[in-house]
Amino acid sequence: MADDLLQLEVSGIEAMVLTGIYSEETHLPQPLRVSVTVDLALPAEKFTPDTPLSGSKNYLDLKRAVTESLPEGLHFTLIEAVAEHVCAVLFAEDERVRRVEVKIVKLAISLDGESIGIRMVRHRP
């Protein structure tokens, strides 16, 4: 039998991040669309109408891992490194986080509505 879990998700966060390998990419931030899904261990007791926020996780923590935790001015050669950073932040701030999935779309090269990017899944070590 699988363990119960709670998934929190924030999708479509747009962030300007200094990333890329080509000379035209290395000095200017580029737009990324980031989605984050976190699997949380569920508490033994069920959620009730008066369960406080501390019984779960604030969705804004997921958003802040993208919008506020990325070091300004730091160049990430690969968007994979951006995803790694987001995963590390979410694992470090809450021991209940069991799995983090980060999807990143590079908007600057997605010209015809396609989604060009990566999806990374990390499990708590």
Image (spheres, helix red, strand yellow):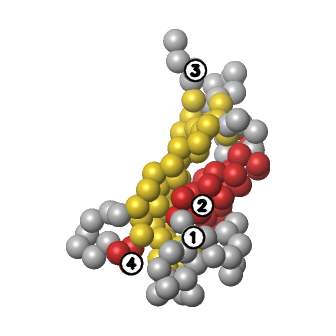
Residue at the spot x=70%, y=35% of the render? 125
Q: Nearer the viewer, residue 102 or 4?
A: 102
Q: Residue furthest left?
A: 112
Mark 4 and mark 1 lie on one chain; the one further toward the N terminus is 1
Sooner in the amino-acid sequence: mark 3 or mark 4: 3
Question: Where residue 38 sits: x, y (%)?
Answer: 58, 44
Question: Which residue does the numbered mark 4 point to in the structure image?
Answer: 108
Residue corresponding to mark 3: 3
Q: Are marks 1 and 2 in contact (CB under 8 Å)?
A: yes
Q: Residue at x 25, y 69 (%)?
A: 113
Residue farthest along the top direction in this orientation: 1
Q: Amino acid at mark 4?
A: Ala
Residue 125 visible? The answer is yes
Relative depth, front residue between 76 and 71: 76
In the displayed structure, 6 sits above or below 115; it is: above
Q: Is residue 125 left or right of residue 59?
A: right
Q: Quadrant of residue 56?
A: top right
For badge 1, the amino acid type reads: Thr
Q: Which residue is mark 2?
A: 81
